[in-house]
Image (cartoon, rainbow, N blue to C red):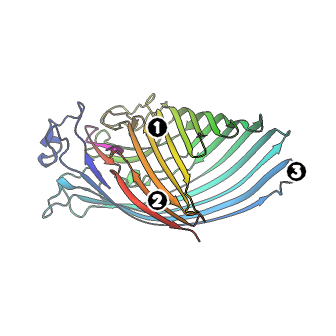
Amino acid sequence: MDSTGLPPTALADLTAGPAVFGPIAVGAPETGFFYDNTDLVAEDSKQYTAEIRLASNNDGPLEWVTGAFATLEQIYRTEGIRFNALTDDSLEPNLADSTMDFEGKAIAAFAQGTYQITDTLSLTAGARYSYEEKDIIAFNTIPQSPKLQLILRAFDPAEGSDSWNNLSWKTALDWQATDDVMLYASVSTGFKSGGFTGTASIAETATTAFEPEEATNYEVGMKGDFFDSRLRLNVSAFFLDYKDLQITRFFQPLGRDFSLFITENAANAEVKGIEVEFTGILTDNIEVGGFYSYLDAEFKGFFGTPGQTGSGDFSGNKLRQAPEHSLGGHIQFFQELNEDKGSITANLSAKYQSQTFTNVDNNALDVIPSYTVVDAWLAWNSSDSKWMVQAWVKNLTDKAYRTHVFTQRGGRVAFATFAPPRTFGLTVQYEY
């Protein structure tokens, strides 16, 4: 992964230049940081899973399923971080490696049933008990000692171990209001186990576990077909209440001259949202579709590890990577060809996403600006459905937009990873 130094905003104070960054690191104000960051990851992972289920034969008003699940996961991962412009190949290679040897075990038991109260009303209830255990050995290596290592510090192999358990549940009520319209309401809980920070800067953060996060989701909605099934419309509204939400941060703590990767637990977070999606058949040959999503995602009572840019109180800030508005749509044309020569399908789609923050401090540099992406494809399918040839273009307008941003040196400068430019290709598929 190659990350590009961004031009500075008014908050990016580069005037301290050599005193803070070293003379080789600072470029002209109009171009921003003088250098890029290269991130190299080698990972070997193995996962074994097993599941057994017992289910009803559905010959009565009660349908049910119960079972057990187990998994074993092993990961050996090394991430190399290199700041190219801080490297003198003959003397000081600015390269550091973070290595993690991880093993995770999990078992769970679950049961869920749906009871048909009437011909149109059904009640669903279920529960799942989970137990997870994680062990890690981590170490960092720096082949030589560069003048300015921005992220990692070398440390010998250090061990960490922890385990967690949880009982999650769900209940839902479905009402088939008409043959084509269903209304529903549900309350469900979820669990994400604790763990250890990957690519940790120091031994303490590598071996200190963060705690599980829990969520309760309240949702109501409608799923319906209208106008002789020529319009399908789904609408939902939800309120998601997080407890101990896990937050990954990259920042420079108070009293340190380098930045840390850390995952810690936010006290609480709330997400309110609305989602709408539709598909319409305008004619026998033309289909249109679209979606809209609104999110109000905010931290509640989150006091994290203080950094150079503030006290660590992020209460009221927006969640990371939670766009307030997302919307998109497509139009698709279908045409059968004469004389049993197959069919042609053409599709044009677009997606818009509003601005998102990539750090909990909502720093003006830690931003992915709003963007719109357009894709298109044209496909031929044989009459026997065995052959498909598709020509496609992704990012049709060649939009330059960011997929990730992180800041350095106390949030004064930023790096970004960009999405691929316009790409095009041909896909040939044969089914037998």
Residue type of the residue flagged with mark 3? Gly
Would residue 155 be visible to someone looking at this image?
no
Q: Quadrant of the N terminus?
A: bottom left
10 Å crowding of disc 2: few (<14), some (14-19), many (20+): some
Would residue 19 be visible to someone looking at this image?
yes
Residue bearing the label numbered 2 = 390
Instruction: Classify mark 2: helix, strand or loop.
Output: strand
Q: Assess whether residue 25 is covered by the magenta stretch.
A: no
Q: Which mark is first along the chain, 2 or 3?
A: 3
Could you tell me which residue is drawn at 19 percent across and 56 percent down? 146
**Picture quadrant where residue 97 is located:** bottom left
Disc 3 + disc 2, Cβ < 8 Å: no
Q: Which residues are magenta?
A: 399-413
Could you tell me which residue is drawn at 85 percent across and 40 percent down? 119
Numbered circle sitting on residue 60? 3
Q: Which mark is first along the chain, 2 or 1?
A: 1
Tell me where residue 44 appears, x and y as whole percent.
44, 67
Nearer to me, 326 or 328: 328
Residue bearing the label numbered 1 = 322
